[in-house]
Amino acid sequence: MRLDELKPSPGSKHRRKIVGRGIGSGHGAQSTRGMKGQRSRAGFSGMTGFEGGQIPLIRRIPKRGFRNTAFRKSYSIINVGDFEKRFAGQADISPDTMEPLGLTHKGDRLKILGGGELAKPFNVKAHAFSASAQEKIKKAGGQIELLKK
């Protein structure tokens, strides 16, 4: 096999659609735009979803649910088992110490969950804790501080 023998797989390359080049282009005399009317003219840019006065599909479909995106509180979630691998004993763990390690995102709140085992004591500051995480941190001799934001 040589570089000059390489070819794309059959069917993987498509011919570019050429419109406005007459009958011989394969797209007809009107270039796939139909016969006459506003939509066949050059420069037409109609409203997205407009269906000629008929109620558009987006308005015909029933709307359901509610998303409170403007006031949603996003949390970065960390398991207590991750502390064991990444921090030395008696370390102070907070959102500020986790961000440089890539464990939290800037501006996110921090929630600690109880996944994994914990043997070393840690001083943990977070916005939320699960009950099992609180139990494991205190059992290992650590301290918990709830942050307000």
Image: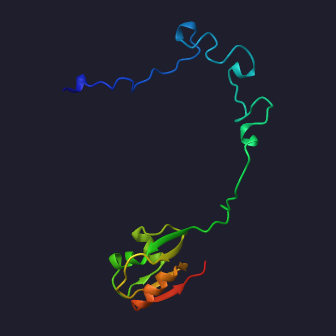
Q: Nearer the viewer, residue 21 or 14?
A: 14
In the image, farthest residue toward the top: 24
The image position of residue 94, as x and y in percent, is 47, 79
Foreground of the two, 129 or 99: 129
Q: Is residue 100 left or right of residue 28?
A: left
Give the residue drawn at x 78%, y 29%: 52
Colour setup of the view: rainbow
Between 62 and 38, the residue placed more toward the observer is: 62
Q: Report the quarter where the N terminus lies.
A: top left
Image coordinates of residue 21 in percent, x first then y, are: 56, 12
At x 68%, y 16%, the residue is 34
Q: Is residue 19 visible?
A: yes
Residue lying at the far bottom in this picture: please name it.
141
Please give the name of the residue rendered at 33% of the width and 26% of the height, measured from the top-left corner. 9
In this picture, residue 62 sits left or right of residue 137: right
**Residue 41 in view (yes/no):** no
On screen, 146 above or below 85?
A: below
Give how far across and how far down residue 55 sits, in percent: 79, 36
Q: Quadrant of residue 149?
A: bottom right
75 vs 132: above or below: above
